Amino acid sequence: MGGMNSLYLETGAEIAGLDALVTQHFGPLAVKGPSSARYQSFSGWFVKNYAGFGATLAAFSAQVPCDVVLFAYQSTVDAFAFFRCRGGTVVRALVFGCGDAEGEWELAEGAPEEWELPMMFSEAELTGLLEYAESDAERELLRARWETLALEAGDFSPRPPDPHGLAAYLEFPDYG
């Protein structure tokens, strides 16, 4: 069991005035966390509505010269959120089970990321889902979803990625 809510800036360089920008957009509880050659991280704030959080992240990303990634999960309820913003635009937004819709995708916008194929759309996952599908129509829908890596709000599958595996795959600093 566990959870986290972290903001990662994909830059190895220091950004002037970054702490003030983070406080401006995310509040005084956001504190600087571990950094690496690839990322600077912040954590400590609380998000009430992940599905509506993209605008805040996009506005922040317009003010920094790098990708901004929000990664959040709560393992006790299988809640998961991932946002990537760049230059004031939400590039990818995924929210699963964070609001009233437990156990389903609440938000899926933007192009799939490289990590989604190995982390969510594996052949083993598809095989298991096909085995328990209740109709040929459901099997066809699953196969089509796997071919296109398509997610839509209201979908129950695929499940979110293992958060520890995703953090390691994306090389987040001092994740644990």
Image (cartoon, rainbow, N blue to C red):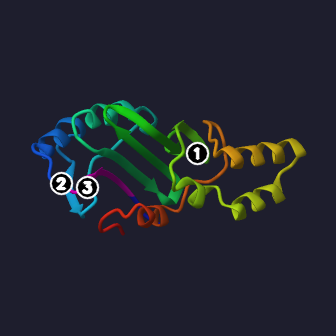
Q: Position of residue 102 (x, y in %)?
A: 58, 45
Q: Is there a contact, CB below 8 Å, between mark 2 and mark 1?
A: no
Q: Amino acid at mark 2?
A: Ala
Task: Indicate which label's residue lies in the foreground, 1 or 3.
Answer: 3
Residue pictured at 76% horizontal, 62% vertical? 128
123 with respect to 62 (left or right): right
Percent from the top left, x then y, of residue 171? Answer: 37, 64
Asked which secondary structure carries label 2, the reply is loop
What numbered label is drawn on residue 13?
2
As drawn, 85 above or below 163: above
Q: Which residues are magenta?
A: 4-13
How many marks do you count on the picture?
Answer: 3
Quarter-wise, where is residue 59 in the image? top left
* Apparent side of residue 123 relative to residue 99 in the rendered image (left or right): right
Residue receiving disc 3: 41
Would you say the residues marked 1 and 3 are in contact, meaning their CB atoms lie under 8 Å apart? Answer: no
Answer above or below: position of 111 versus 3. above
- Tell me which amino acid carries mark 1: Glu
**Label 1, label 3: how many angstroms apart (C-alpha)?**
28 Å
Element under disc 1: loop
Residue 86 located left or right of residue 119: left
Q: CA distance from mark 3 to mark 2?
A: 12 Å
> Between 33 and 102, which is closer to the camera in this rendering?
33
Whether residue 50 is in magenta: the answer is no
Q: Which residue is mark 1?
A: 102
- Give the mark nearest the N terminus, 1 or 3: 3
| Quadrant the C terminus occupies | bottom left
**Residue 79 locus on image (x, y percent):** 50, 51
